[in-house]
Amino acid sequence: MADAAAMRIRALEDDLERRGSVLVAFSGGVDSGLVAALAHRALSDRSVAVTAAAETLAGEELDHARGLAAEIGIRHEVTVYSELDDPEFRANPRHRCYVCQGMRMDRMLELAAQGGFATVCDGTNASDPGPDRPGLRAVGERGVYSPLLAHDVSKAEARRLARALGLTVWDRPANACLSSRIPHGQLVTLPKLRRIEAAEDELRKRGFRVLRVRHHRAAARIEVGAPELVEARRQWGEIEMTMLELGFEKAALDPRGYRTGGADAA
């Protein structure tokens, strides 16, 4: 491990150790995975990783989170609740992430209180804050601690530190909950979420790594990573047929490729 990475890791571990005990809101991505690994190294059994399993979490993501927690060695718990029970969430306003993260962090704080954990941490990093991030506002309002943000660890550095710790997740593509595939103002429903999940599973089976299936009313708009566009065009006939079989009325490949916030694009 390079000296610079070792120093950063030590500083983060010292910070978490001073917290006494930590519950990590754990999605299984590189950021929360790094925080969970640091917490486990610093606090051992005084740390726990908790994954929120609501309707917007794909089954494959939950399986991955379980596997990563086992790799790290941290105790892992799953909390199950319904986001779709909340009419504001179902309505899918522009501040949907505020509603979603509020529910998630409220649950984490409740579990921390029940388990005697002093601090709830998440994986927000220094690259995350921006002008339109209502989910981060919900995290901040609840006093959840973001060690990567506090120590000015960017996304790129989080990947480097995760790699230095030997975490297999270090180069995993960023992901977001399934509701992020539905344009704001269009209802979030369970059939839509399951259709998106099935469509993305099919694309992964075809070898695509960076992808989103945007659910525009009854249509699927597919985004893949720019380097994968040529392969997507080559397979398009079969991909389109699969989307129609899953219940989409039509499907299109976005020639611009994957980009954040693409659900609201025309």
Image: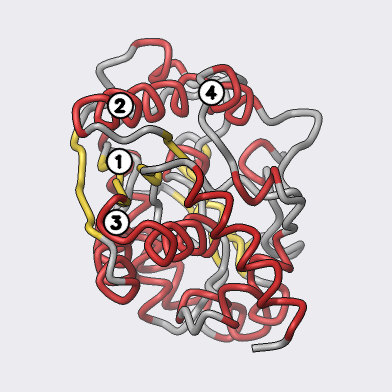
What's the residue at 33%, 70% (across, down)? 68
Alpha-carbon distance for marks 2 and 3? Answer: 33 Å
Residue 138 location, quadrant: top right
Q: Are marks 1 and 2 in contact (CB under 8 Å)?
A: yes
The tally of labels here is 4
Question: Is residue 79 shown above or below 162?
Answer: above
Q: Are marks 2 and 4 in contact (CB under 8 Å)?
A: no
Give the crowd class for mark 3: few <14, some 14-19, many >=20 residues within 10 Å: some
Marks 2 and 4, the one that precedes in the sequence: 2
Alpha-carbon distance for marks 4 and 1? Answer: 18 Å
**Image quadrant containing the C terminus:** top right
**Image quadrant containing the N terminus:** bottom right
Name the residue that disc number 3 marks.
Answer: 246
Alpha-carbon distance for marks 2 and 4? Answer: 13 Å
Is any atom of residue 245 visible in this view? no
Name the residue that disc number 2 marks.
Answer: 107
Callout 1: SS:
strand
Q: Position of residue 23 (x, y in %)?
A: 35, 42
